[in-house]
Amino acid sequence: MQIWERRSKVSVGKSGIGGCGVFACLALGREEVVDQVVGTVITDPDYSSRTCIDLGQSLSLETTSPFRYLNHACDPNCEFFQWDEPRDPPQVWLQTVRPINAGEELTIDYAWHADAAIRCFCGSPACRGWIVDSRELHLLDGVQS
Ligand SMILES: [Zn+2]
């Protein structure tokens, strides 16, 4: 049994990428669990929004603060994961993919489908130019914003 530290590891603030963002309150290690991503589970196969997570089986998680403010980056420092044993309803958690400094903004790869892609201004040297699943980037060849 693991004892979770309940002090929040993140806070919401003004982002250099755009709008609000989620920032580390303390230094985080590689593959460190940040917190559970909470929100409202929606049972509707047609549901879609810019802040929901596809849980599979026609379920979506409409996230609430702080993680609804996670910005996209093409070279993100965090990712969502689910525990190996199934939970009902499914749970989504956020973990780091590399060490993060206190005060650094947390980002994930939205990996949107090409038909939902918008221009990306994340500023990463690895920026794809679009907020899109890297496997669908080729579908945007020749598309003007
Ligand atoms: Zn980018």
Image (tube, rainbow, N blue to C red):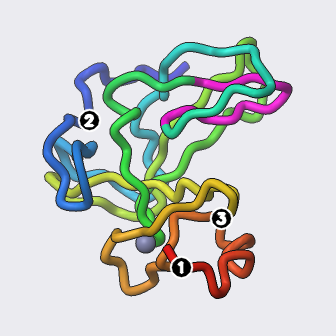
First in sequence, mark 3 or 1: give its number.
3
Relative to 69, residue 46 above or below: above
Snapshot quadrant of residue 115: bottom right
Q: Residues within 10 Å of mark 1 (few under 14, many from 20)?
A: few
Q: Residue at x 51, y 40 (%)?
A: 50
Q: Image point 39% across, 34% down: which residue?
A: 67
Instruction: Give the labeled residue for mark 1.
Output: 144
Among the two numbered marks 1 and 2 on one chain, the one whose residue lies closer to the N terminus: 2
* Distance CA(mark 3)–CA(mark 1): 18 Å
The disc placed on residue 9 is 2
Q: Amino acid at mark 1?
A: Gln
Q: Which mark is residue 133?
A: 3
Q: Quadrant of the N terminus?
A: top right
Q: Residue at x 21, y 57 (%)?
A: 104
Callouts 1 and 2 close, C-beta under 8 Å:
no
What's drawn in magenta, residue-wise? 51-61
Kindly tell me whether mark 1's CB lies below 8 Å from ligand 1.
no
User: In percent of the image, x 52 and y 59: which residue is there?
Assistant: 109
The magenta stretch spans residue 54: yes
